[in-house]
Amino acid sequence: MRYRLSIAITLAHCGRVAVAEPAPTIEHLLTDGWEIAGYVGNYDVRTSLILFKKKDVNHLVQCSTLFDVTRSQRVVVNCYELR
């Protein structure tokens, strides 16, 4: 009985985690009113970090970008919230 209960709780928790919101994109952030708070580029001009802020929000969003001509998807962007 305890085993079944722990499996049910685990599955319920996994279901909630799988419904997470998609990561924000730079285009979506700019259209939603986020402003660029900072920018840092790497010396080889292939990677950069962009920090976004919004007036009524208590956290920041950071986007890392990578430009690599050896990949089939040349521009890779990863945005995440900093809380």
Image (spheres, rainbow, N blue to C red):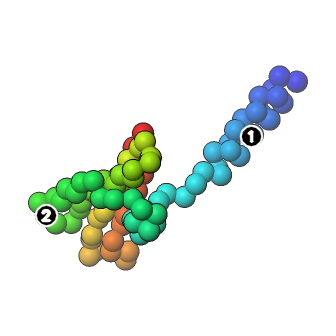
Nearer the N terminus, badge 1 or badge 2?
1
> In which quadrant is the C terminus drawn?
top left
Q: Which residue is mark 1?
A: 11
* Residue plotted at (39% across, 52% down): 54
Mark 2, other Cα within 10 Å: few <14 / some 14–19 / many ≥20: few
Q: Indicate left or right for 45 with 63 as reference.
A: left
Mark 1: secondary structure: helix
Mark 2: secondary structure: loop
Q: Which residue is mark 2?
A: 44
Instruction: Give the amino acid type for the residue marked by disc 1 in the picture.
Output: Leu
Q: Residue furthest top?
A: 2
Is residue 15 something one can see in this rendering?
A: yes
Q: Nearer the viewer, residue 33 or 6?
A: 33
Return the x and y of residue 63 as percentages of the image width and height: 35, 57
Q: Residue furthest right?
A: 1
| Residue 50, quarter of the rendered image | bottom left
Q: Nearer the viewer, residue 23 or 68?
A: 23
Mark 1, other Cα within 10 Å: few <14 / some 14–19 / many ≥20: few
Q: Indicate left or right for 52 with 40 as reference.
A: right
Instruction: Give the amino acid type for the residue marked by disc 2 in the picture.
Output: Asp
Return the x and y of residue 71 as percentages of the image width and height: 33, 73
Return the x and y of residue 36 as percentages of the image width and height: 29, 58
| Proximity of marks 1 and 2: CB atoms separated by less than 8 Å | no
